[in-house]
Amino acid sequence: MKKLDKDTIEAKLLQFPDWDYYDDAIHAEFEFDNFKDCFSAMSRIAFECEALNHHPDWTNVYNVLTISLSTHSAKGVTEKDFQLAEAIEAIVEVQD
């Protein structure tokens, strides 16, 4: 996959208000009601990651999930990162 330029990334991020671009990755942080809801979302996201064969850098502390997406082979953000971000948004939206 081809690395996207900064202008393209910033234009695409207009559709993803919970996400920011820095350090050659797109980042988001989601807060849930409790650990169980957070872990449930992580499990659902994991299935999407496997389906796309694309895996995030993420951390979880109690009810907060922090996600960074970049395509390591491209050394930056690609269309694949936005595909996964879209899937993540759909999962997190259901949790709200």
Image (cartoon, grey):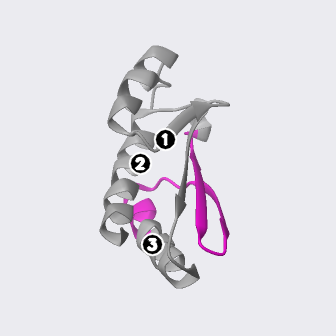
Q: Which residues are magenta?
A: 47-71
Question: Residue 32 at x, y = what percent?
Answer: 50, 70
Picture quadrant of residue 41: bottom left
Question: Residue 15 at x, y = what percent?
Answer: 32, 35
The circle on residue 85 is 2
Quarter of the image with the N terminus is top left
Q: CA distance from mark 3 to mark 2?
A: 13 Å
- The mark lying in front, picked from 1 and 2, is 1
The circle on residue 41 is 3
The circle on residue 19 is 1
Left or right of 58: which side holds 92? left
Question: Residue 38 at x, y = what percent?
Answer: 52, 74
Q: Amino acid at mark 2?
A: Ala
Give the mark nearer the N terminus: 1 vs 2. Answer: 1
Mark 1 and mark 2 in contact? Answer it, CB < 8 Å: yes
Give the mark nearer the N terminus: 3 vs 2. Answer: 3
- On whether residue 90 falls in the magenta region, the answer is no
